[in-house]
Image (spheres, coloured by chain):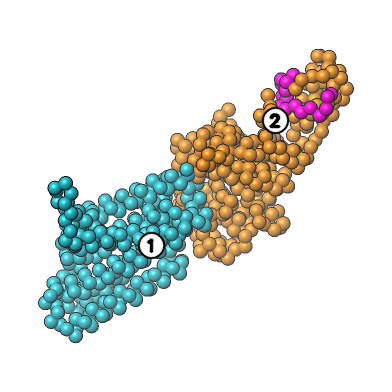
Amino acid sequence: MESDFKLRAQGLTRDYAGTRAVDGVDIALAPGEILGLLGPNGAGKTTTLRMLAGTLAVTAGTVTLAGHDLAGEPQRAKQHLGYLPERPPVHPELTVDEYLGFCARLHAVPRRQRREAIAAARADCGLEDTGRRLIGHLSKGYQQRVGIAQAIVHRPDVVILDEPTAGLDPNQLRGIRELIARLSRAHSVIISSHILSEIQATAARVVIMHQGRIVMDEPLGETAAPVVEIALREAVTADSLTGLDGVAHATALDDHRWQLTPAPGCDIRAMIAETAAGRGWGLLELGAARYSLEERFAALTSRDAPPREAAA
Amino acid sequence: MSVMLAIARHEWSRLFVSPLAWMLLAITQLLTGLLFALSLTDLSLNPQRIGEYDGVSELVGAGLFRFATVVLLLVVPLLTMRAFAEERKSGSLELMLAAPVSPLALVLGKFAGTMGYLTVMWALIGLMPLSLLTATPLDVGLLAAGLLGLWLVMAAFTAVGVFISALTREPTLAAIGTLGALLLLWLIYALSTMDWQPVVLGTTLPLADAAEALSLIGHHDALLRGIFASADLLYFVIFTACFLALAAVRIDMERH
């Protein structure tokens, strides 16, 4: 099971001078998957990504990259990692080719494959015609592309992109989106953003962070299990609902109506109907409500206490 | 190892595309060249002064190298501030920290790149007295010892600069801090020339001797006089290695 994941983080925690910025974050990334990390500003996204990239030490928790422990064998683990920080770490005084050449050497790409690796990274990022231009003379969108090219030049298993679309115009945005979609053919990608539409357009799975914790971790689109709303004739307790297999969270809407959030990947509708009939709860209504990501984001990140505390 | 060389090459090439490096090279050449020409003019006007010295090699060579050390005091901080402080400020240090590079390889790579540049400066300064070979016999051994000393001083200064650069994210702060530290090293030498022997609990403290043993300039001076002692050489090697190791420790702490 462990080896199925390209990246696995367990219990990531980070304290800054007594304040807990990230608290017990678990992330697993399957091969070829694009994971979108969403959250309001200050939710701990960048701190989490920096811990995953090994540029920030963890207070507690472990990170495993392609089977190598990041704390135990950092050099080996980082070999499988490409990282684009919030600010692209480019040297404006160098040309694109010089810079990518250095990045390839830094990641120990063998001399013979270097030229090819640089050409491939440039082709992937739409930088074919800019090899001999100074990075400082490129537009922001192109500098961002150079930043991404730097992260993939050594063909790592895992690519971490921290807000790769920040500050780009709509055309550049579309270009970067297409680029990220292309990357998923050969790499597992984690991309962070505070813009919902960005994540919806690119990611296959979305993780929402709020106040340093993960409040949602689900596949996007049609595969997402719907939230179920039920009305029962009999009064039941929240515990009897959350005690059911596959129910992550139950919220009382009024005395008889409940909203049930399924655990990731579970469709609980049939199970609820059968259980309600079996226990004589008197099921009056059962409806699946598909909430848009935006509604769920707002609901999950507007409350002060993360719902995880209320979950069974 | 190959990663270290990659970083060194990268530093080197980045230096040579920056106007700062060319400007520093030009100004250093101008200043040392002027001093060289002045000391030659002085010698031709007052040839009797040569008796006070150990020939042309010491009068022109050692004098030039001493002056070059003073210039280095100002040049090295401006070079080493780029090593870590500037990269940290611009965010490009993250690239190295996320790469499969050990902190020591990173520090050594930066040091080697800067030393590569300084070696060019060193060679240009060394060529000045050596050019006199066409006109007069020279004490090549004396000049060689002086040149070795100058190179070792460069390495020691750079190691201090790299360490201080690793401490901060403000390039100007790194430069001023390095300048202060190097001047402090200079002051220790001044202490050794003072006739001051404090008595504590009945024992005379060998302050002057201790200061001379610790002072970088004192060890350099021996080499300038043509005395090649392994103790002096070892002093520079240990001094440089210590500060580079400290810098590596600091970079390792970067993640915390």
Type of the residue with mark 2: Pro
The chain ID associated with circle 2 is A
Q: Is residue B150 left or right of residue A58?
A: left
Q: Quadrant of residue B137?
A: bottom left
Q: Position of residue A311 (x, y in %)?
A: 69, 27
Q: Are marks 2 and 1 in contact (CB under 8 Å)?
A: no
Residue beneath disc 1: B77
In depth, the one of B114 and A76 nearer the eye is B114
Q: Colour of chain A?
A: orange
The chain ID associated with circle 1 is B
Residue beneath disc 2: A264
Q: Residue furthest left?
A: B51
Circle on res. A207: none
Q: Secondary structure at mark 1?
A: helix
Mark yes or no: residue A88 visible: yes
Q: Is residue B125 left or right of residue A77?
A: left
Q: Colour of chain B?
A: cyan
Type of the residue with mark 1: Pro
Q: Residue furthest right?
A: A284
In depth, the one of B7 and B190 nearer the eye is B190
- Seen in the picture, residue A131 relative to A78 is either above or below; the reply is below
Q: Residue furthest front?
A: B201
Q: Position of residue A106 (x, y in %)?
A: 46, 50
In depth, the one of A296 and A20 nearer the eye is A20
Q: Write the start and end of the magenta stretch as one range.
A: A239-256
Q: Position of residue B181 (x, y in %)?
A: 34, 58
